[in-house]
Amino acid sequence: MSLRESAASMPFPAEWQARQVIIGDETEVVTGPIREVSNHRVLLEQFGYNPDEFEILGTINQWRKQQPDGEWLTSYFFKVRPRELSLDLPALYAAARRKPRTPVKGTADSRITVVALADVQAGKTGSRGGTPELLDRLQEKRTKLEAHLRKVKPASTVLAEVGDLFENFESGGNPMFTNDLSLAQQMDLAGTIVYEFVETMHRHGHVDVVAVPSNHTAWRMGKTELGRPADDLGLFVHKQVAKVTTAARMDVEWITPADYDESAVIDILGTRLGVTHGHRSARARMIDWWANQAHGGQPIGSADVLLTGHYHSLIVMPSGRNPYTGKSKYWLQCPTVDNGSDWYRATSGEDSDPGILVFDITENGFDLQSLTVL
């Protein structure tokens, strides 16, 4: 008796009788009573699906019934989807199991490379695509970053994650719910993205990771923010990645704001790099906002270099001078790597190419000539 043969005289409940129901891109399959199947591949092949082109989603449910001769027959229920529609999300801990490569030794001169990852907005869909296109774009950026770091050979690196790490559903934007991932999937993917950048940079020595809260990853209900700045879901994702790097004994340290602050500052060879998302100020008034932070006693007020995201376009602007070192202060507004802000382009007419801002800080301060966009 073949797999498809069943005992018609032995009734199965109606919901376990053979049928196929197409719902959008998925097909629900109930096999009806058949002999036990050894694996998923055989099950797909038995019902006309090429396992190289189709996959079973989630779990396979089953209902079994013993026949008079003692044989057991099983009716299987499962969902099938074309593999080309699968997002194939990477798993953070699976990525962490890869053995880290031996770090590359830095050059004799002290040079620390800062990599600014801004407005990833994982899970967002737009004119540049969805999650598959985002993953391809980030892979391209990491490949370019690896080549850049091998050329520069920094003593260590800093990953500045400047906010909006994933899209969320209640970021206050318009339109909303333009996503291809659930919130849990967005956070899972965001953690994997951070880890993969840390892993790439860790091959070149110690990594400092600076993370700040932002409007998209805030804990909120509509436009209403809930809790403290420290309750930001993006910062929660960073905490999970930090657990993985600690377990893997990687030389990585996290710098985040105090519970009620929204900016963080890291001292790099005597130059203070300040990081904030940027959503607390209009773009045209960012320099004034930065200056006022000194009066408010905020960490960012002492920075020599201000790094922001949120506005998705590259801006490099000198502003003022450090009275103690005599060096010019700079505001660096980062480009985005997201899938496009089409609503903003329709409103303002502005658009920009995706990219990752990279620059060096030496014992002489911010190295303007090192500034590049990958």
Image: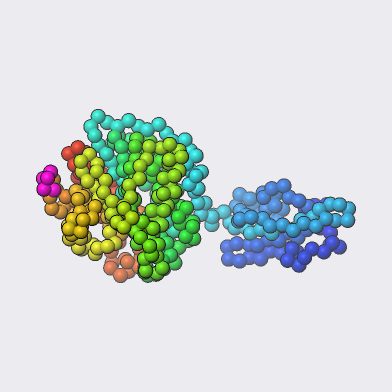
The answer to whether residue 171 is above or below residue 212 is below
Residue 157 image position (x, y, % from top left): 31, 40
Can the viewer see residue 304 in this picture? yes
- Quarter of the rendering containing residue 251: top left
Q: In this orientation, which residue lies closer to the viewer: 38 or 243?
A: 243
On screen, residue 96 versus residue 117, left or right, reads right
The answer to whether residue 307 is above or below residue 280 is above
Q: In this orientation, which residue lies closer to the viewer: 59 or 25?
A: 59
- Quarter of the rendering containing residue 208: top left
- Quarter of the rendering containing residue 82: bottom right
On screen, residue 92 versus residue 330, left or right, reads right
Which segment is the magenta one? 322-326
- Report the residue at 26% width, 46% height from top: 266
- Report the residue at 44% width, 44% height from top: 243
Residue 343 image position (x, y, % from top left): 35, 68
Residue 34 image position (x, y, % from top left): 78, 55
On screen, residue 120 versus residue 372, left or right, reads right
Q: In this orientation, which residue lies closer to the viewer: 293 or 320?
A: 293
- Report the residue at 21% width, 56% height from top: 297
Residue 241 is one of the magenta-drawn residues: no
Can the viewer see residue 316 in this picture? no
On screen, residue 93 versus residue 292, left or right, reads right
